[in-house]
Image (cartoon, rainbow, N blue to C red):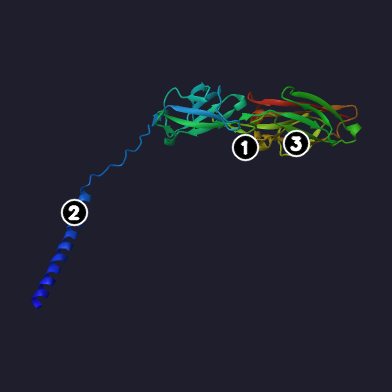
Amino acid sequence: MDKILYVIILAVCVFLAFVLGASVVLKYVSELAEKMKPVTPPPPAEVVPTKASLKLIFFDKLAGGTVANLQVEVFDAESKVRLFTAYTNENGIVTSPFALNRDKEYIVRVTNLTYFYADTIKITKEDYSKSEDMFVKAIYITKFGDVECRLLDPSYTKLTETTPSSRSATCSYNVTVSGDNTPEFKLMIKNPVLNTEFRAVKDPLTGREYKTVIVLTINAPVSLIKTSLPHTTLYESNTKSVIAIEIPYEQLKSYKDPSTGKEIYNEITVTFELDCKGLSTGNSANVIVEFISLADLDYYKENLSWNSEAQVLSQITLTIQA
């Protein structure tokens, strides 16, 4: 009996040893096979050239689509040297005639006054298009608007108005008849052109800043008391003063509401109060009210005239009589 039990125990031990040994061998073989498996190298990193042609695509931010026939100038941002000038094609595209450097800044200017634009761009490796083998950048611009202006007297009676088809007008106001020698006038301004706006442009090429302003030229003895928006004095003498009021740009944007499709034509009202007490009976003095886009205020202060880019979109001559 003892002999039979011994044989059974020995057989079990042999079986366990065989199983455990096979397991160890299998584990060893598996680990060895894993180590001997050929290593797949990572895919090669995409090579982005340090120089390539530059393609600029100009989009109208408000109207949508690309913009053709823009005159585009590109400058080296550091040296301010003009590199090339070209016009956008029917797809709103300009391509540099030679390779430009990656990781370098350039100044892009659009000199068309309706789309006047100036800004600095930087070419990065993310701009590289392998399929086109060039750097590609999108630039979003907006068209400058136009104005309809109505001038109201202190009783809200319309004195005159201007439109894009009739940019100048004249009117008069008699302070003796009205009994008001410190009248407050209201200038109502509307942008009637869809998908346009007004904006300030800081030109990195020249350092000049172009603004959209309401300009009051007030001839003595009439003088300004106050305006409803902050103003800057451009010129002052014994005979006249010239002040500029920068408009609230966002409030004169005209666009189509993307959620409703409704066309929105914005309007602002600016008031100015005049001191006419120095005007003697039978005399008169003129106040010229202008709406000017792309106005360089520093240029006016230096030259007492406007820069060549300035656009006078409305001019109202108000004669104050006594």
How far across and how far down the image is residue 54, in percent? Answer: 45, 28
Of discs 2 and 1, which sits in the foreground?
2
- Say if 227 sits above or below 26 in the image: above
Query: Residue 258 bears which disc, if any?
Result: 1
Query: Residue 270 bears which disc, if any?
Result: 3
> Residue 257's quadrant in the figure?
top right
Are there few (<14), some (14-19), or many (20+) residues within 10 Å of tag 3? some
> Residue 201's quadrant in the figure?
top right
View extreme (left): residue: 3
Quadrant including the N terminus? bottom left
- Looking at the picture, tell me which residue is in the foreground, 91 or 204: 91
Q: Distance between the residues labelled 3 and 1?
A: 29 Å
Residue 77 appears in the rendering: no
User: Could you tell me if the residues under marks 3 and 1 are in contact, i.e. CB atoms within 8 Å?
Assistant: no
- Say if 28 sits above or below 206 in the image: below
Among numbered discs 3 and 1, the one appearing first in the sequence: 1
Looking at the rendered structure, the secondary structure element under dot 3 is strand
**Residue type marked 3:** Val
Label 2, on which residue? 29
Are there few (<14), some (14-19), or many (20+) residues within 10 Å of tag 2? few
Are there few (<14), some (14-19), or many (20+) residues within 10 Å of tag 1? few
View extreme (bottom): residue: 1
How far across and how far down the image is residue 202, in percent? Answer: 58, 33
Q: Describe residue 291's horizontal placement relative to residue 46 as left or right.
A: right
Among numbered discs 2 and 1, the one appearing first in the sequence: 2
Q: Describe residue 234's horizontal placement relative to residue 318 as left or right.
A: left
Quadrant including the C terminus? top right
How far across and how far down the image is residue 211, in percent? Answer: 65, 32
**Residue type marked 1:** Pro
Q: How far apart are marks 2 and 3 (CA)?
A: 88 Å
How far across and how far down the image is residue 4, in percent? Answer: 10, 74
**Residue type marked 2:** Val
